Image: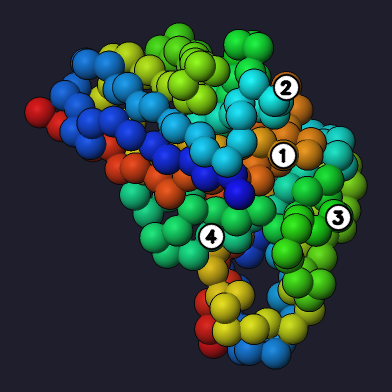
Amino acid sequence: QVQLQESGPGLVKPSETLSLTCTVSGYSISSGYHWGWIRQPPGKGLEWIGSIYHSGSTYYSPSLKSRLTISVDTSKNQFSLKLSSVTAADTAVYYCARHASAWSIGYWGQGTLVTVSS
Amino acid sequence: EIVLTQSPGTLSLSPGERATLSCRASQSVSSNYLAWYQQKPGQAPRLLIYGASSRATGIPDRFSGSGSGTDFTLTISRLEPEDFAVYYCQQYGSSLTFGGGTKVEIK
């Protein structure tokens, strides 16, 4: 069974960089599929952040692209998110996920709340 | 970027009733790239439908998806108590976007 777990600081200061890691178990990232990040501000809807293939090819949301880096470490079976110059608008629950058929999202982590505040 | 508009915003129904949820796209979406999710409070979303009409593994057959082009529908034939939740559609074209969600609440 594929499982994903987000980890990283729950509090980030404005203008700093938000960094999260997703550790995958039950499946080797090297075996395929795209892996992604999605966020959800408190009480609001879902927003795709970006995704990465095991080869390292990346796909970013146009609205976040200038601040975003997603990378993969197949040796650790992890992929990571870095979002720079954060503001309060970046406060959200951040989910890591594995894509499934036709870019749907078949597996989700439990989510981690990141608050941007001084 | 394709914008997805879901309606209604809230649907108030009783258990056993039929629910019909709409997802309209600002431009044509390949049917292969339209999905539906269910989300309950405090939980991650769960994939229900992919490819506009294919049920994901383990999803009961009371859930069905249909549509093409710019108009897609999620139907729940007979609402069970566990079906009251928020539902999102999602598409992938040049980018990936979600609709704003429809809340199905108990009447």
Q: Is residue A89 above or below residue B18?
A: above
Image-based side of B9 in relation to A80, left or right: right
Protein chain holding label 3: B
Q: Amino acid at mark 4?
A: Gln
Which quadrant of the rendered structure holds the C terminus of chain A? top left
Q: The residue marked by circle 2 belongs to what chain?
A: B
The residue type indicated by label 2 comes to Ser
3 or 2: mark nearer the eye: 3
* Residue depicted at x 63% and y 64%: B8
- Judge the density around disc 4: few (<14), some (14-19), many (≥20) Cα neighbours within 10 Å: some
Q: CA distance from mark 4 to mark 3?
A: 19 Å
Same chain check for tags 3 and 1: no
Label 2 crowd (10 A; few <14 / some 14-19 / many >=20): few
Task: Depth check: give the residue in front, A39 or B47.
Answer: B47
Residue pictured at 28% horizontal, 31% vertical? A8
Front label number (4 vs 2): 4
Q: Chain of mark 4?
A: B
Q: Which residue is mark 1?
A: A100
Quadrant of residue B15 within the rendered picture: bottom right
Identity of the residue drawn at 56% across and 30% down: A36
- Tell me where residue A26 appears, x and y as whole percent: 57, 41
Say what secondary structure mark 4 lies in.
Answer: strand
Q: Amino acid at mark 1?
A: Ala
What secondary structure is found at the residue carrying circle 1?
Answer: loop
Which of these two is toward me, A27 or B24?
A27
Camera-nearest residue between B95 and A50? A50
Figure coloring: rainbow
Check disc 3 and report the residue beneath it: B53
